[in-house]
Amino acid sequence: MKIHCIQHVEFETPGTISEWIEKRKHSLSTTHLYEKESFPELSNFDLLIIMGGPMNIYEYEKYPWLREEKTFIEGTISAGKAVLGICLGAQLVADVLKAEVFKNNYKEIGWFPVFTIKKEGYEAPILEGLPEEFTAFHWHGDTFSLPEGAERLFESEACKTQGFIYKNRVVGLQFHLEMSAKAIENVVENCRDELVEGKYIQKEEEMLDKYLFMEQSKLSMFRMLDNFEGMIRF
């Protein structure tokens, strides 16, 4: 499988997703928007992964590539390609799908529980093998409404819509399962000014001392990617 990744800032990388790609012997190409790189042709990839970033999806003057990126995401979805958006990536996907992106009631920064949403008599295939509750890493102030035609997958105490799936080929995750210890250190280093007092904002040392959560997150990320790969190959 050919995978293409959009990276908005140097310090928010695919993280452990790169390990999964290597283990499954897939290929990975990347557009580094902070280096003003161009988007690929749609025929050059099967799965698009859109990473996070500290910017807001409407900061067009500061990040003029945002408009072009949204057009590219829209074209990717319209072409029937598989898409996985993470944090900012999920917000961009939600916006492209005509959902509302808005400021959440709380900033959510650190390790907090996420709950899977399973309808009676139906479980989305991408949730197969995932626990009903797990602890994930968060770093966001915005959130989104559920796009029309999408199914809500996850929620947390601080944020009602933590993830969704659309037409079984487009997934948005507000939280981060791909974070390694080094990745969290890099985010803290670059976004430390956001670590103020808040109900759902942990202190720096709390976030960095959670190696068990990191390993569990990687396993959940791998399981979800395996599930997604199985879904999009049909």
Image (cartoon, helix red, strand yellow):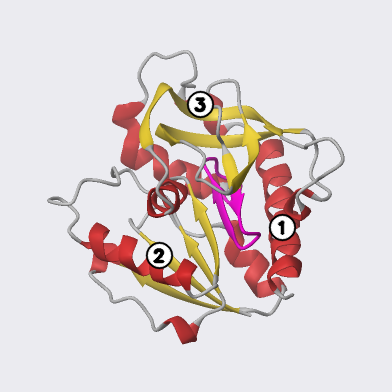
Badge nearest the viewer, 1 or 3: 1
Q: Amino acid at mark 2?
A: Ile
Residue most extreme to the front: 149
User: Which residue is disc 2 drawn over?
Assistant: 73
Alpha carbon separation for disc pair 1 and 3: 26 Å
Q: Amino acid at mark 3?
A: Glu
User: Which residue is disc 1 drawn over?
Assistant: 222
Residue 96 painted magenta: no
Which quadrant of the figure has residue 151? top right
Alpha carbon separation for disc pair 1 and 2: 23 Å
User: Which residue is disc 3 drawn over?
Assistant: 205
Name the residue: 26% across, 66% down: 68
Name the residue: 67% across, 66% down: 20
Q: Is label 1 in contact with label 2 (beta carbons under 8 Å)?
A: no
Determine the secondary structure under disc 2: helix
The disc, 3 or 2, on the residue closer to the chain's N-terminal end is 2
- Counting from the top left corner in percent of width and height, residue 120 is at 84, 35
Badge nearest the viewer, 1 or 2: 2
Magenta residue span: 165-179
Badge nearest the viewer, 3 or 2: 2
